[in-house]
Image (tube, rainbow, N blue to C red):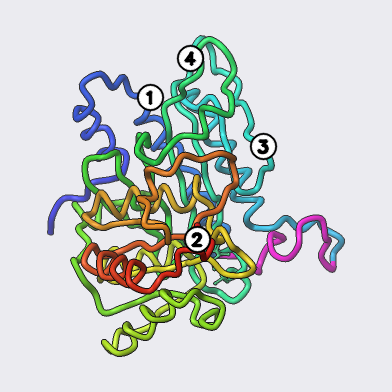
Amino acid sequence: MSRIVTLDEFIIHRQKDFPYASGELTGLLRDIGVAAKIVNREVNKAGLVNILGVEGSSNSSGEEVQKLDMYANDKLIDCLKNSGECCGIASEELENFIEIPSVGSKNAKYVVLFDPLDGSSNIDVNVSVGTIFAIYRRKSDPSGPCDIGDFLQNGTDLVAAGYVIYGTSTIMVYSTGRGVNGFTLDPSIGEFCLSHRDIKIPDRGGYYSVNQGYYLKFDVDMRRYIDHCSDLNLRLRYIGSMVSDIHRILFQGGIFLYPNTRKYPQGKLRLLYECNPLAFIVEQAGGSAINTRLERIMELAPKELHERSTIVIGSPGMVEEMTNFIQRYSIPSVNKA
Ligand code: P6P
């Protein structure tokens, strides 16, 4: 049996990959690992404690109920404050970014964006959910406060990104731009342990993942491609939790699509803290991620914190095939995002 390698050991060992690294990114990744363990503890007993339902409501004993995603949001912020390596945070749960006060004399170099609990509506029915995070180097003057420009960066400028999936097991998958590795939480020792080394996505796979319920609302190119997937006898798997749907595709191959619909003409998923970090991971594993205008997700220039994007992401051979469908069937006048 190979020796256990914990997340902390792995991060510290890989620090030497960054010649000028002085440990700040190491500290940041470890903080996220701690937050993931705390969130995991509550996700695993959701329903037994006052963190379900709608924030601000109270339970039968009159206790304040906190939504689990707000709980996850607060824990991530608390942990990221600890190391002093983060000068600002943006979250799906917060309208604006928040500045993190410096710790001692440290000039924090990084900002972190996250979706603290993506797919949280699945919690109430015990379906897996996830945390998605993206780490950028700040661009603003390190002696001053962070500003919006620190957050509105292309995915190509990501320093690190990853996700935690709270499922049958809790797995943290991340990359710092040198491949993708997965760590499974061993509850008996309370450590994330290396379980999936150097993940590579298959060129093709047997799954496609899209909300089939919107079929009639999709543009003709999307409908033709979905028909093609059916003709190929691909299996439809759609959990409604982006992290879970893409986690399957990362390991077994396939394609995930969230195109434009009448309700979401720009697409539903958030560019900065859903599409970009997952595109970073999938590209680092050898896959592809584009929007329905055939633009590479990671090259999109964000204009606002919570902007949305369409996305087609997964096995390179399947994304390329989807590209051919868009080129062949799309109607140029149709507004695509
Ligand atoms: P729909 C969850 O709410 C989420 O943001 C993603 O995790 C998921 O992929 C998508 O929305 C599901 O959206 O419209 O299919 O329910």
**Residue behind mark 3:** 96
Q: Nearer the viewer, mark 4 or mark 3?
A: 3
Residue at screen point 26% across, 38% down? 9
**Residue behind mark 1:** 24
Residue at screen point 32% across, 84% down? 228
Alpha-carbon distance for marks 3 and 2? 27 Å
**Residue behind mark 2:** 336
Query: Which label's residue is closer to the chain start, 1 or 3?
Result: 1
CB contact under 8 Å: marks 1 and 3: no
Q: Magenta includes 59?
A: yes
Q: Residues within 10 Å of mark 1 (few under 14, many from 20)?
A: some
Q: Residue furthest right?
A: 62
Magenta highlight range: 45-60
Q: Amino acid at mark 3?
A: Asn
Q: Secondary structure at mark 2?
A: loop
Q: What's the magenta bit mostly, secondary-structure-wise?
A: loop
Image position of 17 (left or right of 262): left
| Residue 215 percent coordinates (x, y) | 51, 81
